[in-house]
Structure formats: C-alpha cells, structure tokens
Amino acid sequence: SILSLPLFYFAKIYLSPQTLNKTFLNHYDFSNLDPSQASQKFDQLFSLPNMIQIKSGNFATTIKLSSISASVNKQDSLVQLFPNSFQPLSAFFKDKNYQLKIQTDPLLVGNLIATLSAQISKPFIPTEILLAPNHGLTLKPGQLGYKLDEKSASREIINYLVNFNFDQPLFLTVETIGSLPNPTQSQQMMGNATKLLGHSIILNNPDYYIDDIQIDDKNLISWLDFTQPIKETSLSFFIKQTNQSIKKDPVNAVFRFQNQKVIEFKPARPGFFIDQPQLLKDINQAFKQLISSPQAPASITLKIPLRTIEPIVRTQDVNNLGIKELLGRGVSTFHHSSKIRNMNVARGASVVSGILVPPGQKFSFIKSLGEVSISAGYHQAYIIRQGRTELDVGGGICQVSTTLFRAMLDAGLDIIDRRPHAFRVSYYEEDSPPGYDATVFIPKPDLTFINDTAHHILIQSTYNDDKRQLVYEIYGTDDGRKVEISNYKKWGWSPPPPTRYINDPNLPPGKLVREEYPVAGLKTAFDWKVTRNREIIHQKTFSSSYVPWPAVFRRGV
C-alpha cells in the first residue's frame, strides 16, 4: 500500500524515490529524477504569467490571471510523476506523459466568462426589405450574430493554462448566429418584394362572425426570406397572435330559477380556436401564388380553419340536469358602501352567476371571476392589503365571495378552500356576526368547493342596489342532507389602534370621508356539520383571527 503524507509529493514516492525512465510533464523530460531534482526543474519551467491575451474574432482583451485565482498546483503535478506499487510492470517501459495541474476559482471563472460573453456576443440582425410610405423598397443589410460558447469557454481556459503555451493568445469558441444573403439572393428577395407590392391576404370566417383580418403588403414583405419564400417563424408568430385574439371558450346553456320557474335562457355556444398547422399551410400557398403567378389577384381571401370545443352543457340538456330545488342561500348587506365599490360588487356578482357545476367538479371563485380590470368593467375602490387601505381595481369583490360562502355553508357542499379576512370589515357584519366572511385575491386565496351531489348545481346571484343587498342562491337536487351550525364563539378581544388618515387628492382640502369604523381585534369559530340519513358527510370548524383595525378616513389634500 501507499502511505499518505500531508505535505507535497513525498507521499507518492515513499517506496519509489525516483521518477522512471520516459517520464514527461507537458512534453518536458522528467526522467530519472529524485524529488529535489524534479522540484527544481519544475520551478525553472512552470511559472504562470501575470497576464494572458484572449481573442475571439475581432475581439481582443487581456486579463490578469489573479482575477480567476489561477495557480500551478505543484504538489499534484509532481506526485503523478513518481511510480507507485499499483502500476503494472509494462508502465516501466512505456512513455509516461503527464499534464500540468492548474487550480482556479470556478466562481471567478464563471464571472469572467459572463463578462466576456457580454462583450463578445452580438444579436443577429436579419436582412430586411423596408417599404416606404411612397411604396419605395429599400434593402436593409443585416448583421451576423455572435454568441460565446460559455460551456466550452471554461474548458478552453483551463486547457490553455494546462498547455502552458503563452506565446499564443487564448482563442475562445464563438458561435455564429444567423446567415446573410449573397448578392443573387438579395436580388431575388427584392424581386419578390416588388411582386408583393399592392397585394394582400385576407383572413376571415363568416360562419363564426370573424371579420376580415388583412395582411397587407408591408407585412407580407417583412416575411420574405432569402433561403425560402417565407419566414416560417414570423408566420407562426403571427398565427399564434391571431389565435389569441379570436379564440373563444365554449359557453354552456344557462337558465335561472325564480319561483320555481326558469326566467333566463341562453343557448349553448361552442368554443373555437385556429387550426394553426392548416392555416400555416394555407398562407404559405397563397404567399407562393402572389410571388410566382403574373396574374395573381390583388388580394387572396382565406377562410380561417377552426377547430371547435363543444360546451359541457348543450342546449338540449338544460332541462334534465337535476336543477330542481333551492339547496342553499346566502345574504349580505352593505348600506355604507361607496357607489364605486357597489358597482364592483354588482359587476362581480353578475360574472359569478348562472354557473353550472357538474357532479364531482371543483368550483373555483377565482376561475369563475376571470379577469378583474378596468376593461372588464371594474373600477378602482379601496381594499385592505398588507395592513393598509389602498385603491385597487375591483375593490368590493370580497363582498361577493363572502355572500357566496354563506350560501355554500347553507347548501352543505364540500367546502375546500376558504380564508377569512385579516381584519374585521363592517360591511360583512351588518347582518351577520363576525367570522362568516371569505376573502379572495387573484391568484390566491381562492374560495372553492366540490359538487358532491349526484346532479348539476346552479349558482345564481341577485344584486339589489336600492337595498344594498346581495343574495346568492344554489339550486340542484335535494339529496336529503341537513346542515347544522353550532358552538359559535368569540374571544381574544383587543382594542383598535389610533385613527388612520389617507390623503386623497380627489377630495376638497380638509374634507374627511369615513372609510372604516374602528374595529377591535377578535377571534371567532363555529362548528359546521352536514348529515344525511343521520350519517355525517362533512364536519369542520371554521376559525377566524382578526387583528385590530383603526378608524380610517380619507382626507382631502
């Protein structure tokens, strides 16, 4: 066995105090040397320079090797030269070629490569044909892109140092990105661009009420390529963008109950999206026709190929889904809510309404609500977020989720996700004790339940602006379940903090408008049990912990 000593190369030469014949280090002869001789020769041959030169194409720079903590590992370099007892006999008669051992700091090498990449890499700028307002054509030459091969660069730096040939600079591998047309190809592109002047491709589909989408000559010319008639990447991107703008989700048939009658009916409508591979093929053919046929028409109209998505609930199904009876009802009032906030409540309630939930399916309030934005019909109103009141689009949506949560409790459905507010809010306690609220925020927290009945259920809202009241009703087939709410309790009261004022430039200077009354902190809980035929099917304790909340006034400034 080989003894292991902590210092230098003597560990490996304990049994063999001399290098063998035909021993080479970086092609330098280190044959038949004892440790002292080998060390002396090593010092004469191997000393790293302070600086090295790096080149890549037209780029050149110099770096200090200290910037990557580069050093020669003398110990490991010499240890490998001395034989050990594990070497086969044949090793004593063959050339033994060894490489220098170099140490660097991998993190510093990575930083150097990142810096070099930023200096060397250049984006590819393709050759373009530009169409001027006067319909004149100009060929704008492109530029090749360059990208440093960062994976190879680290290996190339180490190999360069190991080879120890500093008379030559370090050449790093750089990948060329893109290609440029030769004069013949450029001339052909200009010829095709001339043929496209004044021509267009029009996309539509009257069957689905999709109006004309015109691809004018400027866009067509921008898609020209010198290796093929059309840039597939540009065309694919256009088709994806078009699909995003025209695709439609399927719409289920909708009906509403009131006094045991359906008072609203909406037929089902299939969803659709573009058959992108087919449209790509169709536009390609039309494009080739425009640049190859002398008699090509001024415009070519293509019918957009669509693929449909059938709705879950078809029109013929709306009367046999089991929507028969009222399963649960939730009510909330908000007499002191602002007009803007009430508009958001009404908008949110109208969106989360008329929703059918099939048996076994999970209902998500956030998913049903969809986009909350100015363009979606919402307004800025005050909300509570991260311990303060602030303006945000959709303030008041939690009035909707709170009311629906109460209906879910009453219906005895399998409630999965519900989170209380961090603070007590007066709007949710006008007709209910604290603890019966549910907060939502895109994307989380959400309010969800699973329809664990055997039939569809219908979620319906009714907003009454005069009464400042929102009602949610859940309809379906009564399977005999009974709901019991018990053991309601409150504890942990704590006083509200000092009054908070929010400067509002929309109010006259000095005018105060109350936004919130001071509310003490509180903890609440109640037990909720759902039974059917005396068997418990759901049982939960809904707990809430509210931190104290100050009086809040908007103050004109």
Image: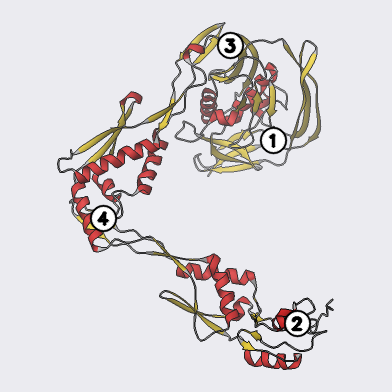
Question: Which of labels 3 and 2 is toward the front?
Answer: 2
Residue 506 visible at all: yes
Residue 37 lies left or right of residue 292; in this view the side is right
Instruction: Say if mark 4 contacts mark 3, CB within 8 Å.
Output: no
Figure check: 24 above or below 518: below
Asked which secondary structure carries label 3, the reply is: loop
Tell me which numbered mark, 2 or 4, is placed earlier along the sequence.
2
**Residue at point 42% right, 37% down?**
244
Q: CA distance from mark 3 to mark 2?
A: 89 Å
Label 1 near label 3: C-beta < 8 Å? no
First along the sequence among labels 3 and 1? 3
Q: Secondary structure at mark 4?
A: strand
Quarter of image, res 554 = top right
Could you give the CA–CA distance between mark 4 and mark 1, rounded to whole angstroms?
61 Å
| Residue under the point 60% across and 8% down | 324
Instruction: State the residue position of label 1.
Output: 423
Gap in angstroms between the C-alphas marked 2 and 4: 69 Å
Point out the image quarter for the N terminus.
bottom right
